[in-house]
Image: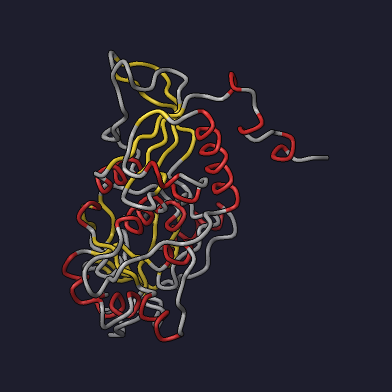
Amino acid sequence: MASESDVLPNVSSLPAWLVPSVYLNWTDDWLRESVAIATRSPEHRLPGGPDGPQRGDVVVTVVAAEPGIVAAVELMGASQGEAWVSDELFGPDRPVVWDTLFSGAAAYSRSSGWLPQEHARLVLDGIANQFKHGASGTIEPGECEESALSPNLHALRLLSHRLIAGWDLRREERCATCERFVDVSTLRVHDDGARRAALEGITERNLQQLISDTYLVCDPCHELLHPHAVAAQRARMRPQCPACGARGNTKRIVWGMNVGDVPLEPDVVYGGFDVPVPTPEWYCPECHANFATGAVASRALGDRPADLGAEAAWSAEL
């Protein structure tokens, strides 16, 4: 039996009256828009006015500079006075690069307005194709040690946060090394794979690898990072175990979320869905102590519970 994707036609094959009008919403305020879209914030700005998109039209929001990153594709829905709100169709779950959607897409760089119908078809088909099969090509990441990474890579890291962490971006996120919560709009991006790529003679990394190699870090940590890898600096900054005195391999405990199939980082362990009080923040793999400020307990962590019953028992033991 044919799958749904085999049965449904491309937009390009549909009659003109079935193809929605597409409005290109390109913004140079890429950081604010990327954070607003990734955090699902109402601060995300949609074009308005009588000449702007109306109910049933599609708005494609692109952020940063050439080649541009497709941040959201939205169908205009209900109205709030003169402003329109949208029912989101896509974003920001997977990277989509504007310039690779169709031949000639680069001509629309940094512009906003209605797309001709033939290009609207190609844009919608290109977005669907990249969403299904992954973005093609790569981007120039920039030199992290020399100045700053590309705004495109920064935007991609923010918009792809759910793919990497398993949850939507929050207004405050942990710095990848010191693990303090910081306003996400002030976090820097650090390319942790650039040094490794240079040592291994890798001249080009694909888009997914670039995103995976990019971490969000606070300013003080970014100043210290370049001589070290993220994992090495993070290990140095974690607390010493108060039970056995071990230092450098403490693991942070993640509580209160259903991790499902989301891969945990090597130096993070899953504590359970139910959050105990007081809540241990750190786990020592040397002596199996788990501790927070002024509290030490002993329980081996590291394996996820097989079922909810085991999970509840696990949390109760803590």
Q: Can residue 75 be seen here?
A: yes
Q: Residue lying farthest right?
A: 1
| Scheme of colours in the image | secondary structure
Looking at the picture, tell me which residue is in the foreground, 58 or 35: 58
The N terminus, quarter of image: top right
Looking at the picture, tell me which residue is in the foreground, 81 or 137: 137
- In the rendering, at what x and y percent does residue 62 appear? 37, 42
Residue at 40% x, 26% y: name it. Answer: 86
In the displayed structure, would residue 121 be above or below residue 249? above
Q: Is residue 262 left or right of residue 307?
A: left
- In the rendering, at what x and y percent does residue 138 appear? 46, 62
In the displayed structure, would residue 45 be above or below residue 216? above
Looking at the picture, tell me which residue is in the foreground, 92 or 144: 144
Q: Can residue 239 be seen here?
A: no
- In the rendering, at what x and y percent does residue 238 appear? 27, 75
Q: Residue lying farthest left?
A: 220
In the displayed structure, would residue 210 be above or below residue 44? below
Q: Is residue 126 left or right of residue 297?
A: right
Q: How many marks?
A: 0
Q: Is residue 23 left or right of residue 132?
A: left
Q: Identify the image quadrant of residue 271.
A: bottom left
Residue at 34% x, 41% y: name it. Answer: 37
Residue at 35% x, 52% y: name it. Answer: 66
Q: Identify the image quadrant of residue 305.
A: bottom right
Q: Is residue 108 left or right of residue 220?
A: right
The C terminus, quarter of image: bottom left
- In the rendering, at what x and y percent does residue 237 appear? 24, 76
